[in-house]
Amino acid sequence: MEKAAEVLLIPIAPGEEVIGTIALRAAEKGVKDGAVVSLIGMVLKCAVSTMEKDDATNDIVVEYSEALELSGNGEIRDGKVHIHAVLGAEGNRAVSGHLHWATTGNETTNAYVVPLG
């Protein structure tokens, strides 16, 4: 039977920026490459992009300033964090795409990271 993969819990305190905090904490733990297998919490501000339908090289970035429930996953490559997220808003509205940045709200947000290599 194979040994289970190590999973690192990276807490992101209220008011911290999500992407930068994951990158910093992963680097502190010596993680250069990894899988962000789960991201859960809430944010008050963020920027999310999707691709233009006729030009996949053009990202359309939209900033949000409202309470949003956050879930996502992604990867860390050469220390750079890449997250895809789904964010739930009031009225059961959903926002999804590439998470450029996000500031956590009044609860701790958690990232679960499996180091690779």
Image (cartoon, rainbow, N blue to C red):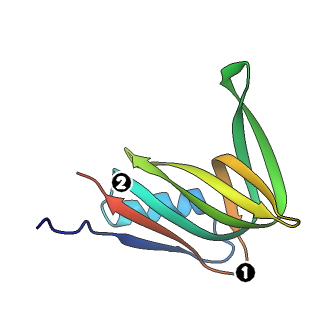
Which residue occupies 61% across, 63% down?
71
**In the rendered structure, which disc, 1 or 2, sits on the residue that comes first in sequence?**
2
Q: Which type of secondary structure does the marked residue at label 1 adopt?
A: loop
In the rendered view of the protein, which quadrant contains the N terminus?
A: bottom left
Which residue occupies 22% across, 69% down?
4
Residue at the limit of the structure toward the left, as seen here: 1
Front residue of 20/100: it is: 100
Which residue occupies 34% across, 69% down?
7
Q: Which x, y percent locates residue 95?
A: 75, 52
C-alpha gap between disc 1 and disc 2: 27 Å
Q: Which x, y percent locates residue 8?
A: 37, 70
Q: Up-down: is 53 above or below 99?
A: above
Looking at the rendered structure, the kind of residue marked 1 is Asn
Front residue of 105/42: it is: 42
Q: Up-down: is 65 above or below 16?
A: above
Mark carried by residue 106: 1
Q: Which residue is mark 2?
A: 34
